[in-house]
Image: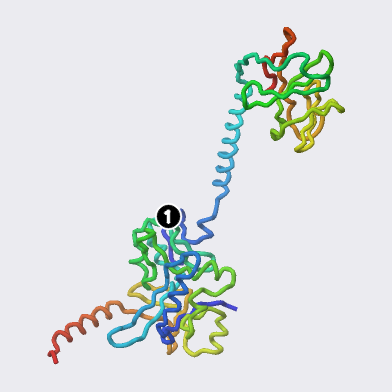
């Protein structure tokens, strides 16, 4: 039975429980590694949790000049090694999901490592244990499929970069790959801004 | 994982590859360590052969009639931090040894009935006449203190085999 991590953004209620639970972890107490993002705060209260997606070919590790980010045999991308990390923030800029955090206090990049101290011994990650709406799920894939609806996707397209991740995202429709057209997003934003400026003030 | 450049071999991303040790590296490590051990041992060998030019000053320990036959007097020689004991084995036979057991430095005691110096810590025993190890864990004989008898007094003059 395959144990998987699944994010379902639609079920996130923005309760911040995962953020607090993450900071409880003994390996990085007080510093939360999870990102709880507001999708579009002006128009909706919808939030989404962002944990590390644990890419099969991790971009953060590929760009690290200090050889500080390592991937375990089970595909978990670890946080930077303290003796090696030089705090250059290359990974912060390179990660397509915006996961790595540069923590100024420690002069080190820190990121979600799927609670490796827990998951490597068969426990669930802190965030998944506390999420009240199962927006963050960690467990057997079959169990999820038996009681939940939606389609699991772990293929991504960012511009010209194809990314495959260990963590799954739930999509309402069957999708082979989530295509994120970054240029379209930027163009759309620009257009919205121009429209807002052009619109007469009520 | 995608096509990797050649330099990536030296800086791998996966744990397994990062912790992988080649046979050549292991052999190199082995030779370096054994070489260092060899050189380190040489230091101790040299120290062993080095001439010891310790000088001892004579020190009065006791008067001849101060201790009975089979009696012991404790004193300190050659410095204040070196406990030693003087034993009168027979009417005219005196011996003195450092009191520290050569095993783990516990103080040894004279067992007159058995004619031995015994260490209570690990049951080590030394011959009272020569200082040689009779039983137990001590690796070396007790360092013997050379004595000189003059004018009815006993003087400590030096230490043998310290």
From the image, tell me which residue sits under label 1: A84
Q: Specify the subunit that label 1 lies on.
A: A
Which image quadrant: the N terminus of chain A? bottom right
From the viewer's perspective, is A151 left or right of B41? left
Q: Nearer the viewer, residue A68 or B13?
A: A68
Residue at figure coordinates x 84%, y 17% from the top left: B90
**Image x and y of residue A119, in percent:** 55, 71
Check the image and name the residue furthest to the right.
Answer: B113
The percent position of residue A26, horizontal first and vertical second, equals 50, 66
The residue under the point 81% across, 15% down is B93
Relative to B113, does residue A191 appear above or below in the rendering? below
Q: Quadrant of residue B103?
A: top right
Q: Is A128 positioned to the left or the right of B109 in the image?
A: left
- Mark 1 packing: few (<14 Cα in 10 Å), some, or many (20+)? few
For the residue labelled by badge 1, is the local secondary structure a helix, a strand or a loop?
A: loop
Residue B30 appears in the picture as rendered: yes
Left or right placement of residue A84 versus residue A72 in this view: left
Q: How many marks?
A: 1
Q: Position of residue A3 (x, y in %)?
A: 56, 77
Residue at far front of view:
B66
What x and y, as percent, mark residue A54? 46, 71
Identity of the residue furthest to the bottom in this view: A202
User: Is residue A98 or residue B1 the one in the foreground?
Assistant: A98
Q: Please identify the quadrant where the C terminus of chain A is shown.
A: bottom left
Residue A164 shows in this picture = no
Q: Quadrant of residue A45?
A: bottom left
Residue located farthest toward the top when viewing the structure as drawn: B151
> Up-down: is A52 above or below B90?
below
Instruction: Report whether B44 appears left or right of A193.
Output: right
User: Which of the two residues, A84 or B156, is positioned nearer the viewer here?
Assistant: B156
Residue occupying the point 37% across, 76% down:
A157
């Amino acid at each position: 039975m395959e144990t998987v991590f699944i994010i379902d953004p639609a079920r996130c209620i923005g309760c911040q429980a995962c953020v607090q639970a993450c900071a409880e972890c003994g390996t990085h107490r007080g510093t939360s590694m999870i990102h709880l993002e507001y999708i579009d705060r002006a128009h909706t209260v919808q939030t989404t949790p962002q944990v590390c997606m644990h890419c099969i070919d991790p971009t953060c590790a590929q760009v690290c000049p200090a050889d500080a980010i390592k991937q375990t045999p089970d595909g978990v991308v670890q946080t930077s090694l303290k003796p090696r990390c030089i705090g250059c923030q290359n990974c912060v800029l390179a990660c397509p999901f915006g996961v790595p955090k540069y923590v100024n206090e420690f002069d080190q990049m820190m990121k979600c490592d799927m609670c490796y101290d827990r998951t490597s011994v068969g426990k669930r990650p802190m965030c998944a244990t506390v999420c009240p709406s199962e927006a963050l799920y960690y467990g057997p894939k079959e169990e999820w499929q038996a009681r939940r609806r939606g389609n699991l996707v772990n293929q991504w397209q960012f511009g010209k970069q194809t990314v495959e991740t260990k963590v799954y995202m739930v999509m309402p429709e069957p999708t082979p790959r989530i295509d994120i057209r970054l240029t379209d997003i930027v163009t759309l934003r620009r257009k919205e801004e121009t429209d807002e400026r052009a619109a007469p003030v009520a | 994982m995608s096509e990797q450049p050649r330099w990536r071999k030296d800086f791998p991303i996966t744990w397994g590859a990062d912790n992988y040790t080649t046979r050549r590296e292991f052999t190199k490590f082995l030779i370096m360590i054994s070489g260092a051990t060899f050189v380190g041992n040489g230091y101790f060998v040299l120290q062993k052969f080095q001439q010891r030019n310790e000088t001892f000053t004579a020190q009065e320990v006791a008067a001849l009639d101060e201790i009975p036959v089979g009696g012991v007097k404790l004193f300190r020689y050659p410095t204040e931090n070196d406990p030693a004991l003087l034993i009168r084995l027979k009417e005219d036979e005196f011996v003195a040894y450092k009191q520290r057991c050569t095993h783990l430095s516990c103080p040894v005691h004279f067992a007159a009935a058995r004619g031995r110096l015994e260490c209570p810590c690990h049951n080590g025993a030394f011959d009272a006449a020569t200082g040689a190890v009779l039983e137990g864990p001590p690796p070396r004989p007790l360092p013997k203190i050379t004595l000189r008898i003059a004018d009815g007094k006993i003087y400590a003059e030096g230490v043998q085999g310290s």
